[in-house]
Amino acid sequence: MGTTNNVEQKVVSPTVSRDLVQSSDTTEVKADKVETVNVSNTEPWVILLLILGWLLPSPNEIARWVSNLFKRKT
């Protein structure tokens, strides 16, 4: 078990030309301007579809298999 010691923080800077916000929050990100957002998370179903598309036979092979079911054996 740990202890937390909260101390009041105060920043004095007469040269700051905009509002200065100081916070000890750890659950959010604050930004003035965001140029680019990169998201690299891929949904699991997309990966599953890629794997199935690689493993399953082509449409031509499926059609050949179905047509062979209806052919008479001699």
Image (tube, grey):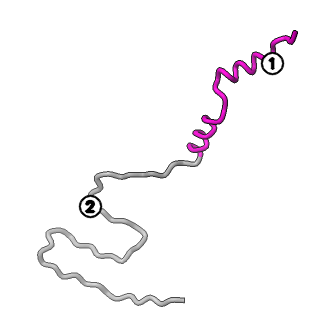
Indicate the position of residue 36 as horizontal and vertical percent values.
32, 51
Do residues under tags 2 and 1 come within 8 Å of each other at their CB atoms?
no
| Element carrying mark 1 | helix
Q: Is residue 4 magenta?
A: no
Indicate the position of residue 42 as horizontal and vertical percent values.
51, 49
**Which residues are the magenta region?**
45-74
The quadrant in which residue 22 appears is: bottom left
Indicate the position of residue 9 as horizontal and vertical percent values.
29, 84
Q: Is residue 30 left or right of residue 67?
A: left
- Say which amino acid is labelled 2: Asp
Image quadrant holding the N terminus, namely: bottom right
- Say which amino acid is labelled 1: Leu
Residue for point 28% across, 52% down: 35
Q: Is residue 59 magenta?
A: yes
- Which of labels 2 and 1 is toward the front? 1
Label 2 crowd (10 A; few <14 / some 14-19 / many >=20): few
Classify 53 as above or below 24.
above
The quadrant in which residue 52 appears is: top right
Indicate the position of residue 62 as horizontal and vertical percent values.
70, 23
Residue for point 29% across, 55% down: 34
Image quadrant holding the C terminus, namely: top right
- Residue 69: mark: 1
First in sequence: mark 2 or mark 1? 2
Q: What residue does disc 2 label?
A: 32
